[in-house]
Image (cartoon, rainbow, N blue to C red):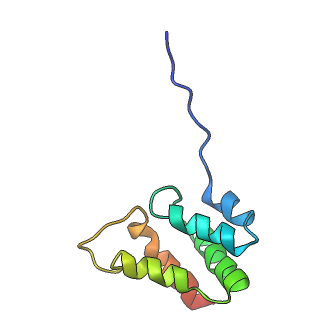
Amino acid sequence: MYTAKKEPEVKTLDILKGIYEESELDELFKKLESNYLLENFEINDLLIKKYYDICGNIDLVLTLLNKTHYPSSTQQSYNSRYFWMTVISALKN
């Protein structure tokens, strides 16, 4: 009997914790639309913190929200249902 080997799930929080350079943030940003979920406040808080600490701003996060027309409900993306937490995390900082 053949069983498919399940690949280990990549955790967004673990990826974020290992980011220390702008180039690493850029790579994460490119994959936010399909690979990494922003599914809780801990992830969103750390995402915003990393952008502020490394880049000095959250321009790329705002670009992502604009690109997906957030908060419009006419266009959905991989993380659309979680962007409300991203906005709250940004406002807290």
Which quadrant would residue 15 be assigned to in this image? bottom right
Residue most extreme to the left:
74
Q: Outermost residue toward the front?
A: 23
Question: x, y (%) of residue 31?
Answer: 52, 61
Q: Residue at x 33, y 79 (%)?
A: 69
Task: Judge whether residue 68 can be spotted in this image.
Answer: yes
| Residue at 60 percent of width and 89 percent of height | 92
Q: Nearer the viewer, residue 22 or 57?
A: 22
Number of numbered labels in the structure image: 0
Q: Is residue 31 above or below residue 60?
A: above
Image point (55%, 69%), residue name? 29
Q: Give the image location of residue 1, x and y in percent.
A: 49, 9
Residue occupying the point 51% across, 77% down: 86
Which image quadrant for residue 17? bottom right
* Snapshot quadrant of residue 82: bottom left
Quick check: 32 left or right of 74? right
The C terminus sits in image quarter: bottom right
| Residue 38 in view (yes/no) | no
- Compared across the picture, whether 57 is left or right of 68 comes to right
Q: Position of residue 57 (x, y in %)?
A: 62, 89
